[in-house]
Image: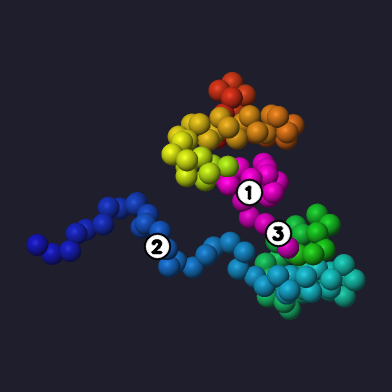
Amino acid sequence: MGKRSQVVGRKPQKNQNDEKKRKRYDEEAMKAAIMMVKSKKAGYLKAADTHNVPRSTLFRLCTAGNSSGVTTLGRKPVFPVELEKMLVSYLLEMEKSFFGMTRSDVRRFAYQLARVNRIPSPFNKENESAGK
């Protein structure tokens, strides 16, 4: 038999080595482009072409008042970094003492941690657990 025929309309699976699709610009170039637009030396199109950054991203960052040019991808974390590190160390200690927690236990614990510390969260109040 020969090669398998591909199913029409099906997307090929994403490979780990594929080039990333988001944030393919240099942050320093974006900062320079923002400064160029803010100082009225050039418009969005000319600044984007000069510094080789996406025009739509330049426009969004300029109108949002983000002069640093630094953006983060993904959701905003619920817990501060210190509290999250404490949670991780607690979970690892529980694992060392052979009292490993299940995934649902960890989700319930994270919900209670957010509630006790009065941290606003998108957690499920009905099930009293983090996540879906």
User: First in sequence: mark 2 or mark 1?
Assistant: 2
Q: Position of residue 31 (x, y in %)?
A: 78, 70
Q: Quadrant of residue 113?
A: top right
Q: Which residue occupies the foreground of this view, 114 or 29?
A: 114
Please give the name of the residue rendered at 34% of the width and 52% of the height, measured from the top-left corner.
10
Tell me the residue that label 3 is attached to: 71
Image disc number at residue 15: 2
Q: Marks 2 and 3: in contact by CB < 8 Å?
A: no
Disc 1 crowd, CA 10 A, few/some/many (<14, 14-19, 20+)? few
Q: Is residue 2 visible?
A: yes
For the magenta stretch, what is the residue range? Answer: 70-89
Tell me the residue that label 1 is attached to: 85
The amino acid type found where label 3 is placed reads: Thr
What secondary structure is found at the residue carrying circle 2?
Answer: loop
Q: Which residue occupies the foreground of this view, 127 or 13?
A: 127
What secondary structure is found at the residue carrying circle 3?
Answer: loop
Q: Is residue 34 magenta?
A: no
How far is the residue under mark 2 from the one under mark 1?
31 Å
Q: Position of residue 99 (x, y in %)?
A: 46, 36
Image quarter of the N terminus: bottom left
